């Protein structure tokens, strides 16, 4: 196990009815900005529940944060925060809204172009406004971590930043608020959480038994309950297990003390930036093919994954590995997420631009050992054509 | 899954060499009290490493905190804190030292007899001095939780309290600092962590899949690496896995949203208070017998435990349950911890005093459903005679 420093200060309020507790957690004198996305929270009652809980406070609204939130949109929110002297941000939504809120929280206190946060890997971030979260879409884990991914539309760039200053103070996870999600978002969320776990687990071995078993426990839960969420959207226990799993998939816990890969995400970000695919779609395309390309380096963990997640424990080792990767693809497709570029109308001719973008962004040594070069990335994409 | 509120603010610094980072974490102007136990930390170099890291600060010492720390001893530390205007407490040791430090941290700021903290379940605790921890014995999880167990020698009473004010600010977990532990303490620590997990896991089912799988992951790690720590005391990975497992066994994570039992601990505390047995010895006596007595109520989880922890998946269900309990006893004995009262020179005549003490302390409806009455407790103890 590698040395590590783990410190996650976010408070989680989990369960049916917890939104009303926001009234105790947001300071009564706060000037609050409620940030959200496309407006589904207005249709399903979540917005009203949040507003009721905030009663008595000065509340502003900023809707329309898009999937893959852009600096162009978020700059308007930063202007609103400054103009109205907002001092508390409440994100109501999924990962895009939360990530966008983190960018606003840090950008509003920055005396520079906020895009420099991405360019400087948040080294110029000294402080951020306090953040609360009401999660409506289990997927990214952003509700309990210090990371955000932001896109610049103008230049078709998508980058992540990490800063301890943007850990949410609290996050409300109410599984009933996910009942009305469209199937596409449920499928994407499950695939996203699954690949988050894989980026931290499916690496070279590190003798970190607890992290491995926690990761496997999350994967098994996603495999069992993901399809059930599509089949029975109002099963509380299923929704609760998925919601808590997605949070734990990327709150730092399973990533402590182990090597991490993240090449699938890095390549996927370019696919989204260039071709507009959903984040989870890009992960479903890249991951299985990348596992095939890197099966030698990841052999020991692939066999462990085959055994513990897919119960493939006997027979030829290479056949077990291939079967485990195939089961992974089947699972993504069962969640409604295609695993080939062609599923999204893209051919091999889409690949060179991705490689060029990776090169332009300096992403030439990816993966847990740096061995995911541009050639390896190209091979992975060609395997998914 | 039940609703829950999870918020664990303790920072973990894990790995070889992390003690020196204390120098960055304890304020440079602090008046520090270093609390420890029997003095083994002086023999093995840990004390010197801590003192070197604290260089430049005003440092006081309080040694001699005993296993099952007593209010009688800790009151002297409280007097020292007040006399010397100490404003930071650094616990260097295992669960007893950390628990004692928590009591000192709260007691020093209390305008009343500190024992009232136990009598009032910490309802009278409003604040506590900041606490740091250097863990030398993986076992209790106290380094990353808000609980402490304190004994009053005069009245032979042992009680727990919980207060958010006593979460350690940080805990240093350096596996190399556990290499010199005596086998008895290693065995006790593994059994203690194992039973912590079982108190939160082996209950009536709650459809909390992640908590279940995390708990099983911790149990499997203890079963695999516990005996290896006895056989090869200086295997870093083994020590690291055990150390992180013991912390995660009782940092709140696996207990969120699920029913909890704790009757084994409650009965065990009386055995320690009356007869001086090590804490882990009392758990090894009570748990297996209690599982037999309550096998009907816990049937579903016992079968899950048999399958996932002991790989007992086929054959008669009752035989599987009995085999799983038997394997649990074998494991405790393999760690050098006897599972019968007679292993410690106690006969059936020791039981009535335990039942009387439980009754005197109002412990007449224990367990996750309150069904562990004094009769059930007696049956469990008689089964371990």
Image: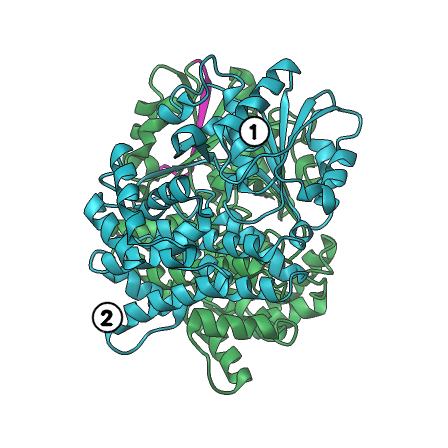
Chain colours: A cyan, B green
Is A126 inside the magenta-drawn segment? no
* Count of numbered circles on the image: 2
Q: Chain of mark 1?
A: B
Q: Position of residue A225 (x, y in %)?
A: 55, 63
Q: Position of residue B354 (x, y in %)?
A: 64, 61
Residue bounds of the magenta highlight: B29-39
Residue A129 visible here: no
Q: Classify the position of the C terminus of chain A by image quarter.
A: bottom left
Are labels 1 and 2 on one chain? no
In the image, taking residue B89 as reference, residue A53 lies left or right, namely right
Q: Position of residue A214 (x, y in %)?
A: 43, 55
Q: Say which quarter of the image contains residue A297.
A: bottom left
Mark 1 secondary-structure assignment:
helix
- Residue count near mark 2 (Cα–Cα under 10 Å), binned few <14, some 14–19, many ≥20: few
Q: Position of residue A237 (x, y in %)?
A: 64, 61
Tell which of B161 and A299 is nearer to you.
A299
Q: Say which quarter of the image contains residue A338.
A: bottom left
Task: Relative to B155, say whether B219 is above or below.
Answer: below
In the image, taking residue B85 as reference, residue A342 lies left or right, namely left
Residue under label 2 = A318
Tell which of B293 and A313 is nearer to you.
A313
| Residue lying at 76% horizontally and 40% vertically, measured from the top left | A49
Residue A17 visible here: yes
Contact between marks 1 and 2 (CB within 8 A): the answer is no
Residue at far bottom of view = B316
Residue under label 1 = B105
In the image, taking residue B369 as reference, residue A106 lies left or right, namely left
Task: Relative to A113, say whether A137 is above or below.
Answer: below
- Residue count near mark 1 (Cα–Cα under 10 Å), binned few <14, some 14–19, many ≥20: many
């Amino acid at each position: 196990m590698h040395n590590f420093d783990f410190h996650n200060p976010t408070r989680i309020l989990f369960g049916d009815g917890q939104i009303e507790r926001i009234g105790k957690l947001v300071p009564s004198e706060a000037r609050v900005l409620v940030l959200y996305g496309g407006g589904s929270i207005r249709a399903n009652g979540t917005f009203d529940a949040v507003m009721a809980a905030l009663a008595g406070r000065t509340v502003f609204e900023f809707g329309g944060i898009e999937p893959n939130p852009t600096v162009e949109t978020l700059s308007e929110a930063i202007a609103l925060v400054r103009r109205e002297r907002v001092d508390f941000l409440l994100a109501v939504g999924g990962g895009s809204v939360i990530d966008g809120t983190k960018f606003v929280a840090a950008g509003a206190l920055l005396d520079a172009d906020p895009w420099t946060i991405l360019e400087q890997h948040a080294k110029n971030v000294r402080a951020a406004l306090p953040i609360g979260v009401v999660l409506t879409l289990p997927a990214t884990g952003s509700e309990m971590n210090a990371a955000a991914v932001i896109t610049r539309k103008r230049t078709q760039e998508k980058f992540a930043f990490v800063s301890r200053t943007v850990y949410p103070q609290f996050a409300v996870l109410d599984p009933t608020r996910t009942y009305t999600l469209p199937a596409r978002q449920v499928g994407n969320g499950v695939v996203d959480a699954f690949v988050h776990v894989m980026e931290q687990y499916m690496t070279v071995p590190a003798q970190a038994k607890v992290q491995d078993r926690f990761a496997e426990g999350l994967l098994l839960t996603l495999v069992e309950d993901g399809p059930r969420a599509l089949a029975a959207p109002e099963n509380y226990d299923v929704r609760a297990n998925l919601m808590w799993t997605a949070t734990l998939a990327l709150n730092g816990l399973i990533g402590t003390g182990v090597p991490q890969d993240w090449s699938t995400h890095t390549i996927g970000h370019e696919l989204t930036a260039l071709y507009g695919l959903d984040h989870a779609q890009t992960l479903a395309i890249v991951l299985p093919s990348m596992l095939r390309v890197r099966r030698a380096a990841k052999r020991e963990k692939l066999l462990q994954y085959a055994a513990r997640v897919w119960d493939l424990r006997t027979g030829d080792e290479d056949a077990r590995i291939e079967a485990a990767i195939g089961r992974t693809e089947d699972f993504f497709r069962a969640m409604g997420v295609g695993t080939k570029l062609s599923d999204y109308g893209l051919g091999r001719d889409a690949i060179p631009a991705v490689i060029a973008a990776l090169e332009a962004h300096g992403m030439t040594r990816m993966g847990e050992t740096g061995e995911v070069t541009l050639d390896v990335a190209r091979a992975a994409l060609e395997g998914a054509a």
